[in-house]
Image (cartoon, rainbow, N blue to C red):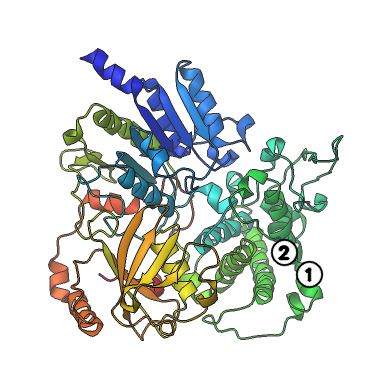
Amino acid sequence: MIQTFEKKIAESKVFVIGAGGIGCELLKNLVMSGFKNITVIDLDTIEISNLNRQFLFRKEHVGKSKAEIASSVVKQMSQDVNITFYHDSIMNEKFGVDFFRSFSLIMSALDNRAARSHVNRLCLVADVPLVESGSAGYLGQVSVILKGRTECYDCTPKPIQKTFPSCTIRNTPSELIHCIVWAKSAFNQLFGENDPDDDVSPEMDSMESLPTVSENSSTDNASTNGHHTTKENSANGSSQHIEQPKIHLNTRQLAENNGYEPKHLFDKLFHTDINYLLLMADLWKERKKPTPIKFSELVSSGLGGSNVEKVSLDPNTQWSIPRWAQVFEESTVELACKYKEIQQQSDKNTLVWDKDDDAAMRFVAACANLRAHIFHIGIDTLFNIKAMAGNIIPAIATTNACVAGMVVVEALKIICGQLDKCRAIFITRQPNPRGKILVDEKPAPPNPNCYVCSVKGQVLIRVNLEKMLLKTFLSTILLKTLNMLKPDVMDICQKHRVLISSEEGETDGIMDRTLQTLGVLNGSQLECDDYAQQLNFKIIIFHDDKLDADGFAVDSNVGNVEESVTGKIAATALDNENALDKDEELKRKRPSTAQETREVCMNEDGMKDGSDDIEISPKRSRLE
């Protein structure tokens, strides 16, 4: 019996997605448990900030592929293990359904919602078991996803994300919230409680192992910023060598040495540091490169700095990038004065970020929008950024280890065919009445109304048909909210007119038109397909004139709406369905500890930040 069990483990082929905090522990556990055929994928490279919780990595590995180094290290633990790695994105089309079908089991240790949803959908189509995992501070979660037997990743609505990988914050932001987190760290580095290990600048140690510098990634001589670089052509002139600085000053030391001069700080944070990031060629293989900006260029064109005319100071108004450069200058001067005053009282005194402190809030908003502009992310108003500035939960190595251990426990059950013994496991804040921190429960059944795994999935969406553009519908709702990859959309009510095509350029000509001018009516039914995910579902769209051009409300967990019901009647029914009586709301059962843990554990890794919770923007409210 034991020999048969060991044989099944040794012969199984498993795929680990993610080689970060949980992924490193998971790979080690798999090898030590007898798994012989392992494939791992991760797009990221190793940073110094990873070393305190990702124990397969050492300082000499900084700048190298996580998947490659993790594979080589676990190979040393067991020479007979057959491990393959990919330094690539799981969203790449070559990792499709056929690729997934080649494995006995998939284990996800991902750190973002879109990728986790994508993996969930491919596993369902390929009919391959998936063990999903995540952690957030001291909370952790492991769930088994079996097609037709358990709920899938998309069966339950996901809360607003509150934890983000530190490498995303520092190197590759893709959302405005990433830039806000970075901006709050910049505030702490300059004026708050200083943590040298949490510097917002790129880590100079990682320059030792950088690949060839791309053509447009040259940096200026930055000796005044504490980094001295020289370029030397190789024999064939095709590569450049970066001479490493002997002394690296952190952000606060640089600021103090230059008297907190705002223009100098601006160029350091938004030009020199960005150019260093551009030297990390591997980061930009699958991403759009950031564009550095300099304060002097804004000033010389009459667009920034002290020469900018005083425009509207309304926090609800969208300010220009030059205006944000001026806000950065003004707020830096004001905060530097406050910091020097408090330092005179005691050199241990520091400023504390508070969203109600006008100068601190303007500094964070300016830094966030300037960084967002550099990384080609849409900027926002001071008012909205104030609402978004929130808490980032720290990554805990012990939590990751517990989660990885429970992933292997569930994996062993699946490999041995004991599917009825699979459990959903949660690491909770407090012990339950039986004194348990690790709480397990039977996996929930599939949600019959899930738009991903149900037979006839559909989503109800409210938008302002008169104002929302088709390109906004595509980017904000289909790609960012419903996590589609290559969507095709047809309007059933217009004889299957194609509104959005995955074929490049086919529908570009109508992207700037509103949904109403394209014939989309209140109650229209849109058929949505994604060939990359082999996903098909229906969107029933309703008009709400109270929403603005970007606003929307989504309910992905509704029952079937009869096609014969008119849009007006359906909308009225939806209104009635969502008009919850306050007394009934109070009588509802409070979510269990396990449910709370499930809602929090959306990400694999995190970064320490402030103390306020992120407030949900009214533009992204869900239908309750």
Please name the residue shown 66% across and 69% down the image: 328
Q: Is residue 340 above or below residue 151?
A: below
Task: Please name the residue that numbered disc 2 is placed on.
Answer: 293
Dividing the picture into quadrants, the one containing residue 561 is: bottom left
Please name the residue shown 19% across and 30% down the image: 418
Dividing the picture into quadrants, the one containing residue 321 is: bottom right
Give how far across and how far down residue 433 sits, in percent. Answer: 15, 42
Give how far across and how far down residue 161 sits, in percent. Answer: 40, 58
Disc number placed over residue 297 in the picture, else none: 1
Please name the residue shown 46% across and 40% down the image: 18
Q: Is residue 550 above or below residue 207?
A: below
Check the picture and name the quadrant holding the N terminus.
Answer: top left
- Nearest the eye: 514 or 271: 514
Residue 138 visible in rendering: no
Q: Amino acid type of disc 2?
A: Ile
Contact between marks 1 and 2 (CB within 8 A): the answer is yes
In the image: residue 377, left or right of residue 456: right
Give how far across and how far down residue 276 sits, in percent. Answer: 71, 49
Residue 411 visible in rendering: yes
